[in-house]
Amino acid sequence: MHIPLYRHNLHGHDIEALGEEFKHLLSGMILSTGSVAEEIQDLFAGYMGTNHCLLTNNWTNATIASLLTLGIGPGDEVIVPAMTFVASANAVEAVGARPVLVDVDPHTKLMDITKCLGAVTGNTKAVMPVHLYGQMVDVKALRAALPKGIRIIEDAAHAIESSFDGYKPGAYSDFACFSFYASKNMTTGEGGAMITNDRSLFEEYQTIYRHGIDLCGYRRHIVDKFIPAEAVTRGIKANMPDISAFLLRPQIGSADATRARRESIAKRYSQELKGVSTIHVDDRATSAWHIYPVAVEPSNRHRVLEQLYERGIKTTIHFKALHMMEWYRERYGYVASDYPYAYAWGESVFSLPVFPTLTEDEQSYVITNLNEIIARG
């Protein structure tokens, strides 16, 4: 049996209907951001319970545009957890600011809020809580604890369907940014989104994410008078085209059902796997279960991964601790003990398939083989 790490979520939808919609889209003039993207933005904002949404070409540019909108740049600091994908810190460096790392909670592997507060300096302009694996940081508590004026940008790349104590990403932050990468719970191949409840931030962001131009091309071309493009501020190119956005409609509609299926898969893993550990999920949290991580003894991990691959089971590592990545380790002189919980987890973790179309037989195959490999030592 061969089991991939993920299957994208479009397999469960009417591919023929999507094809017909795509042909209709191609028959029109607008291929970049237009009426389709605007419709999907409203749908996504409604699903998330926020006032404003813009679809973007990836998570990274969504976040860079958020940082630019907040005026963050050289000399500024943004606090980031040491256990996250490298993109979280890369976005901060891309605007010339410094990512300041903090360790994670040893149980949830999420940013430790107490350590975050201890890292605040006079140069701190923002905090980036990462909702790792689909479990949310308590952003409401973080907001209440932070000094006034420090912004929050949520890295919600794993957390489209997540909530904490009844609220979702975007409820208490300045921005929340999402990913629609190929392996994400919702996908456009490449893509992302930004949500916010702040109208003034939304309007400024909307200009920045289209090269600082005051009116998008689609809007300039559907009126009966000539409107020249005028750059009124700095900006980047971050918008999502209609030809990607149309893929999201059916996935938004099925999001809660597919999340429930992933949760069912995760619960079975937790009940039947032996000799591995996983994350603790807070009783107040509803996890998106974007990833199901397990950990073994670091000295044993390579053997386990090799044997899983030999048996047709694909996996990967989410993630090596950020301060042990070559670029950040050498740039800032980090050592493993700087962030011990992130380091220990990064040396032992790997991910199992948890996509919603994973069959009972496929999951049984994963469980049986992993238990056997672990038992053999």
Image (spheres, rainbow, N blue to C red):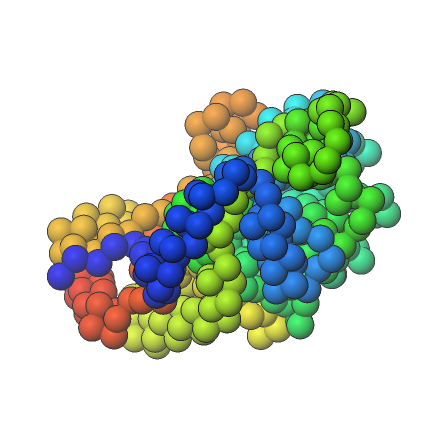
**Residue displayed at 69% across by 56% down:** 170
List x then y, in percent, for residue 182.
39, 47
Rendering quarter of residue 62:
top right
Depth check: give the residue in front, 15 or 353.
15
Residue at x-position 33% and y-position 59%: 15
Q: Position of residue 288 (x, y in %)?
A: 50, 64
User: Which quadrant holds the C terminus?
Assistant: bottom left
**Residue at 38% across, 55% down:** 20
Q: 294 or 156, which lies in front?
A: 156
Above or below, comparing residue 275 to residue 233 in the picture? below
Position of residue 118 relative to residue 291, above or below, is: above
The residue that appears at 73% across and 35% down in the rendered structure is: 224
Quarter containing the N terminus: bottom left
Evaluate whether residue 26 shows in this view: yes
Q: Position of residue 75 (x, y in %)?
A: 74, 24
Q: Is residue 340 left or right of residue 302?
A: right
Q: Is residue 282 visible?
A: no
Identify whether 213 is placed above or below 120.
above
Residue placed furthest toward the right: 148
Q: Position of residue 6 (x, y in %)?
A: 32, 55
Q: Nearer the viewer, residue 81 or 30?
A: 30
110 lies left or right of 67: left
The reply, left or right, for residue 209 in relation to residue 347 is right
Q: Total marks drawn? A: 0
